[in-house]
């Protein structure tokens, strides 16, 4: 606003001289100057119009300030470079022509300043001085302004990206914490639930035969104690692994990777001697009692398919009529695959103890070229009044945990009742 007022006053003052030279009333020249100079008000909106007006009034020797500011604003704006070059050239030519005419006129009236070189030199110097500095300064300011805007936009974009990454990192951390809870719960369920179920079965059998067969009751009591010690040993190993990994995670950076490192690996079970798949006998009781005392594997190593026969033997020792059949040539597979296959059979046998105590059960394991298949199928359970029923509680998460384990390795898991009234659990896991 202030520059526009100064420009209007300048043009009004120059309008007096213009009116006298043109032979028009002075007030007309002053009014024309005020209107022309006021155009500088819109230089930020229409810089091209301001430059055109300044070029138009250049022959009247008006609008010096308006021309300089108009060229500066135009060069600093977002106008195309060819438009800036064209209007700057027009302003240069107009200023040069007016300057050379006025200089030539002045030289003719002054005898001391002669020569043909003086008017062009003065006109060129004046034209360059009135156009080049303003255009160059405008180009510099415009480029710097665009650079600052670009940096500001980039900073805003980076801030938004960082905020989005922080939100995603928080979501991943929350997902990792939930996954940790699910995996820990699944490990605890797999390690403890099977042996506790066997303990309850033996306790029920002990209650049934305590008075009728004291010798068998003593054997069942020994099995209950052995199973309890095994469950405590495995639980202690699980908690030891959790403590060690949690301690190492807390000592390092508290990021998502450290949180994920707390997830426990498969826990080991003691290496045991092979037992025959048969009904309970004194030899089987002795082997089961000695299982706790045999060497334990290192923490972090899980069960393998070589221990499957022993697992089935433990269920047979608990009174289950179970048969194991293996098809194909036995071979070592990936550790995760063998652990998952073992846990599937273990959980399926636990479910038989819970829901179909006394039912005849078939465990089938098949080694194929690129996969391992397993199936645990039980026949219909005996009558509800059978004394073998231990009324075991169920959390309803066994089948879900088995399916999660199998699908995590790219396998297929299917479970459901059979036409004969029993239940079947089947899983196929890639061997690689």
Image (cartoon, helix red, strand yellow):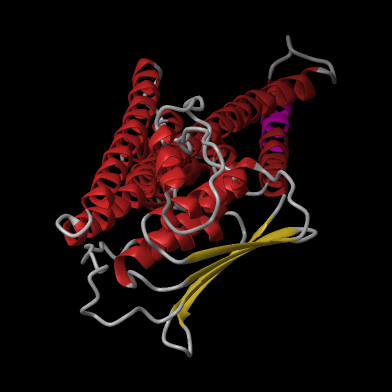
Report x, y in % for residue 4: 36, 40
Residue 54 painted magenta: no
Residue at image point 21% right, 50% down:
214
Identify the residue at horizontal 78%, vertical 54% (top origin).
329
Q: Which residues are magenta?
A: 97-105
Q: Is residue 271 visible?
A: yes
* Res 359 quadrant in image: bottom left
**Which percent across, then down, holds residue 404?**
47, 59
Of the 4 image quadrants, the one containing the N terminus is top left
Against 121, is 191 above or below?
A: below
Residue 224: which quarter of the image? top left
* Residue 260 visible to the viewer: no
Pick whichever, 142 or 296, lies toward us: 296
Q: Position of residue 61 (x, y in %)?
A: 55, 38
Judge whether 106 appears above or below 271 on screen: above
In the picture as drawn, the residue positioned furthest to the top comes out as: 112
Closer to the camera in the image, 365 or 116: 365
Q: Nearer the viewer, residue 29 or 215?
A: 215
- The residue that appears at 54% across and 29% down in the rendered structure is 144
Q: How many marks?
A: 0
Q: Assess whether residue 103 is covered by the magenta stretch.
A: yes
Residue sitting at x 51%, y 36%: 272
Report whether 299 appears left or right of 234: right
- 42 over 251 or under it: above or below: below
Given the current orientation, which residue lies at the most extreme bottom position? 419
In front here: 54 or 428? 428
Image position of 356 (left or right of 279): left
* Residue extending furthest toward the right: 116
Q: Position of residue 302 (x, y in %)?
A: 52, 38
């Amino acid at each position: 606003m202030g520059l526009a007022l100064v420009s209007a006053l300048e043009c009004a003052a120059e309008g007096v001289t213009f009116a006298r030279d043109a032979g028009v009333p002075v007030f007309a020249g002053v009014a024309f100057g005020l209107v022309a100079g006021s155009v500088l008000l819109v230089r930020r909106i229409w810089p091209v119009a301001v430059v055109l007006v300044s070029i138009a009034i250049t022959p009247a020797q008006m609008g010096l300030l308006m021309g300089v500011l108009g060229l500066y604003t135009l060069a600093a704006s977002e106008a195309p470079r060819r438009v800036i070059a064209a209007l700057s050239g027009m302003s240069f030519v107009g200023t040069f022509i007016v300057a050379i005419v006025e200089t030539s006129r002045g030289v003719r009236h002054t005898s001391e300043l002669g020569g043909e070189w003086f008017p062009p030199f003065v006109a060129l110097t004046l034209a360059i001085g009135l156009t080049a500095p303003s255009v160059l300064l405008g180009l510099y300011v415009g480029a710097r302004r665009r650079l600052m805007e670009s940096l500001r936009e980039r900073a805003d974009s980076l801030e938004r990206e960082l905020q989005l990454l922080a939100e995603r990192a928080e979501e991943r951390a929350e997902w990792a914490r939930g996954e940790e809870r699910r995996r820990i719960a699944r490990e605890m369920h797999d390690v403890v639930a099977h042996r506790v179920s066997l303990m309850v079965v033996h306790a029920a059998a002990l209650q049934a035969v305590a008075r009728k067969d004291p010798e068998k009751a003593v054997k069942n009591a020994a099995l209950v104690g052995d199973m309890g010690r095994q469950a405590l040993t495995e639980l202690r190993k699980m908690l030891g692994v959790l403590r060690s990994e949690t301690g190492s995670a807390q000592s390092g950076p508290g990021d998502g990777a450290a949180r994920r490192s707390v997830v426990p690996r498969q826990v080991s079970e003691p290496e045991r001697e092979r037992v025959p798949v048969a009904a309970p006998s004194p030899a089987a009781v002795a082997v089961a009692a000695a299982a706790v005392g045999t060497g334990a594997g290192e923490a972090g190593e899980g069960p393998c398919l070589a221990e499957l026969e022993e697992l089935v033997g433990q269920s047979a020792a608990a009174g289950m009529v179970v048969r194991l059949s293996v098809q194909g040539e036995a071979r070592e597979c990936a550790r995760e695959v063998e652990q998952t296959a073992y846990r599937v059979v273990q959980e399926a046998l636990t479910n038989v103890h819970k829901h179909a105590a006394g039912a005849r059960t078939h465990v089938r394991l098949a080694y194929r070229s690129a996969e391992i298949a397993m199936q645990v199928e039980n026949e219909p359970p005996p009558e509800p009044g059978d004394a073998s029923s231990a009324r075991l509680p169920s959390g309803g998460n066994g089948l879900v945990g088995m399916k999660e384990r199998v699908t995590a390795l790219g396998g297929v898991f299917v479970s459901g009742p059979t036409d004969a009234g029993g239940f079947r659990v089947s899983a196929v896991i890639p061997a690689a």
